[in-house]
Amino acid sequence: MSSPSATLFKVLRFLLWRRWVLGPLILYFCGYSLVSCATVYIGPAEMGVRQVYFGAKSGIQQRLLSTGIHLVVPSYERVHLYPTDVQILDMTANAERSKDGRVTQAIRIQTSDGYQVTVECTVLYR
């Protein structure tokens, strides 16, 4: 009596060495890997900027990419993603982390008469 794993292995070996199973399986995995490498998804709260690495149109392209799936030539161009919703930069003296944005040190400014002034502020930007 053979074990269930040995039986499963025999069935898989039988199926995978048939042309009508192996051919479409290889075609599916090759197509999937090509599509996953050559596309980029831009989410609802993001915009994309295409950068071409070399050639006549190298550099940052002027046209923005909106939400959706876009084709990209791998190793020739890249898409940089930027958020479009409001971002928060919190400059504060205490080191507690904010849930909604980035936290950095407060700004320390020296006045003209030599005193140190600490400025704590929150900057909202897009």
Image: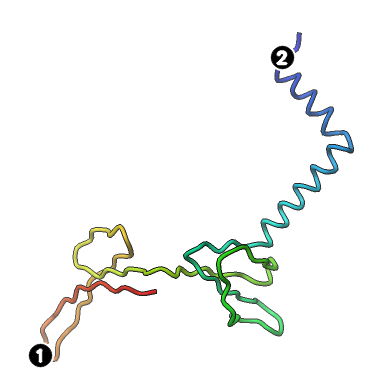
* Residue at which label 2 appears: 3
Q: Quadrant of residue 114?
A: bottom left
Local packing at callout 2 (Cα closer than 10 Å; few below 14, some 14-19, many 20+) is few
| Near-viewer residue (109 or 31) | 31
Q: Nearer the viewer, mark 1 or mark 2?
A: 2
**What amino acid is labelled 2 in the image?**
Ser
Location of the C terminus by quadrant is: bottom left
Q: Quadrant of residue 124?
A: bottom left
**In-image side of 120 versus 72 (left or right):** left
Vertical placement of residue 6 versus 123, above or below: above
**What amino acid is labelled 1 in the image?**
Asp
* Residue at which label 1 appears: 113
Instruction: Name the residue located 52 percent from the left edge and 62 percent from the top edge.
Output: 43
Location of the N terminus by quadrant is: top right
- First reached walking from the N terminus: tag 1 or tag 2: 2
Vertical placement of residue 57 versus 79, above or below: below
